[in-house]
Amino acid sequence: MNIFDIFLTGFSLSLDAVAIAVAAGALHKIDLRHAVKIAVFFGGFQMFMPLIGWMAGLGWSGYLESYGNMIGFVLLFAVGLKMLLETFKKETKEEVKQEKHLAETKTLTIMAVATSIDALVVGITFNFVPVNIPLAVGIIGAVTFVLSLAAVYIGEKFKRIIGKEIEWLGGLVLIGLSIKILLS
């Protein structure tokens, strides 16, 4: 996986967090301290979850090495498809209520874990494609941090114009990367 692919992966994985950060900015006037807190939580979880997935997959890599491209394809394709399908999901009142209190540590932790499950799965695929793990997790975390921080302020400016439609882009990029892995 080259550096461009890593950036694309980081961008795609960050879009769930970005959508929530946009909502946070749209719902509340958030000061710099809370905006940075949101970005640190999302970026931190997006950085560590692929690392955890990679470590969990280490035990499997010897047994599944010959099927690595197929496994990488299936996992990334599934995550991308999941992201696309989530754009059709209607938010419940509880999810909207959680967004209103996003800067609270408990709610922020729940949202950061929920948005980084995809990154855990992508981390597993790192066992089956050549990738520099420290570089990949660093870029994924940094991209999510920067985009989430910017998204809070974009949310303030544009309110809910962007919405969940941004997840379509992330889903399509991950599906594209899955096809590239399958063909390589």
Image (tube, helix red, strand yellow):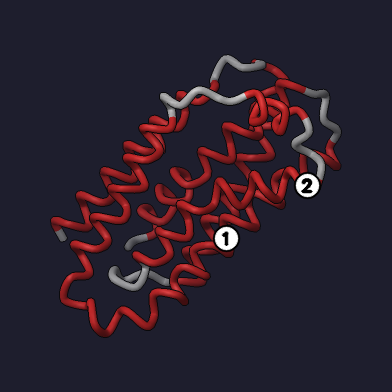
Tag 1: residue type? Met
Q: Secondary structure at mark 2?
A: helix
**Residue at numbered disc 2:** 37
Q: Are marks 1 and 2 in contact (CB under 8 Å)?
A: no
Say which quadrant the C terminus sits in: bottom left
- First-in-chain label (1 vs 2): 2
- Residue 161 point in image, percent of width and height: 57, 15
Task: Give the side of residue 11 with respect to residue 78, left or right.
Answer: right
- Residue 70 point in image, percent of width and height: 18, 62
Q: Identify which residue is drawn at 22% across, 69% down.
A: 68
What distance separates the C-alpha of mark 1 from that of mark 2? Answer: 15 Å
Tag 2: residue type? Lys
Q: Identify which residue is drawn at 20% across, 64% down.
A: 69
Q: Identify which residue is drawn at 51% across, 69% down.
A: 51
Between 131 and 30, the one nearer to me in the picture: 30
Task: Give the side of residue 58 with respect to residue 68, left or right.
Answer: right
